[in-house]
Image: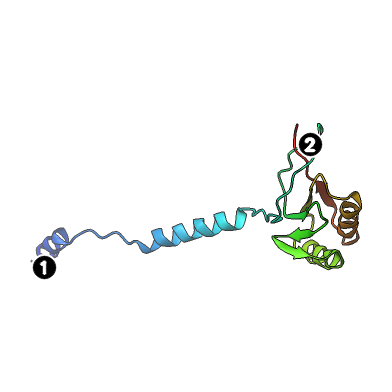
Amino acid sequence: MKSIRSRRHQRGRAVEINMAPLIDMIFILLIFFLVTTSFVKESGVTIERPSAASAVRQEKIHLMVGITADGKIQIEGNPIDIRSVLPRMQRFNAKTPGGGVVILADKDSATGDVIRVLDQCRLAGVQNISIAAEEP
């Protein structure tokens, strides 16, 4: 008699879907995509790039350094003095070893300013340094 009652009780019970594992899985996927995405930090300066026939698009860029026509330097939208470039690049190199630095120099900027920034990057130990140019 007891088995008949338990069967009736089981048939009348509503089916429930547990949403907790689904939500956990969505959060795990979200974290995975956030961790694997590489974020590009812009230089924060508007420049006119010079054109070069040998310009090649670089895929892995981690930091952009902008140099305006009047010699002002900006990293991630913040103005920075030439004396501060070396410690900033040392911190960058410690955080992301093997990271790429792209120097965005205005076509009217002085060559000396570009060379000084390039030299500071090399002194900090950054190996992957590029100078941005437009394809003609």
Measured along the vertical axis of the image, is residue 127 above or below residue 88? above
Measured along the vertical axis of the image, is residue 57 above or below residue 13? above
Looking at the rendered structure, the secondary structure element under dot 2 is loop
Residue 33 in picture, x, y percent from top left: 55, 54
Residue at point 64% right, 54% down? 39
Give left or right: position of 117 versus 38: right
How packed mark 2 is, by other alpha carbons closer than 10 Å (few <14, some 14-19, many 20 or more), is few
Residue at point 64% right, 53% down? 38
The image's mark for residue 51 is 2
Callout 1 amino acid: Lys
Who comes first in sequence, dot 2 or dot 1?
Answer: 1
Residue 114 in picture, x, y percent from top left: 87, 52
Observer-side mark, 2 or 1, equals 2
Give left or right: position of 100 versus 14: right
Give left or right: position of 30 versus 57: left
Measured along the vertical axis of the image, is residue 134 above or below residue 8? above
Residue beneath label 1, please?
2
The span from disc 2 to disc 1 (Cα, nearest Å) is 87 Å
Q: Relative to the observer, which residue lies in front, 66 or 18?
A: 66
Furthest residue toward front: 70
Q: Relative to the observer, which residue lies in front, 96 or 4?
A: 96
Give left or right: position of 35 versus 26: right
Quadrant that contains the N terminus: bottom left
Callout 2 amino acid: Ser
Residue 46 in picture, x, y percent from top left: 70, 51
Looking at the rendered structure, the secondary structure element under dot 1 is helix
Q: Relative to the observer, which residue lies in front, 60 or 24?
A: 60
Say which quarter of the image contains residue 23. Answer: bottom left
User: How many numbered marks appear?
Assistant: 2
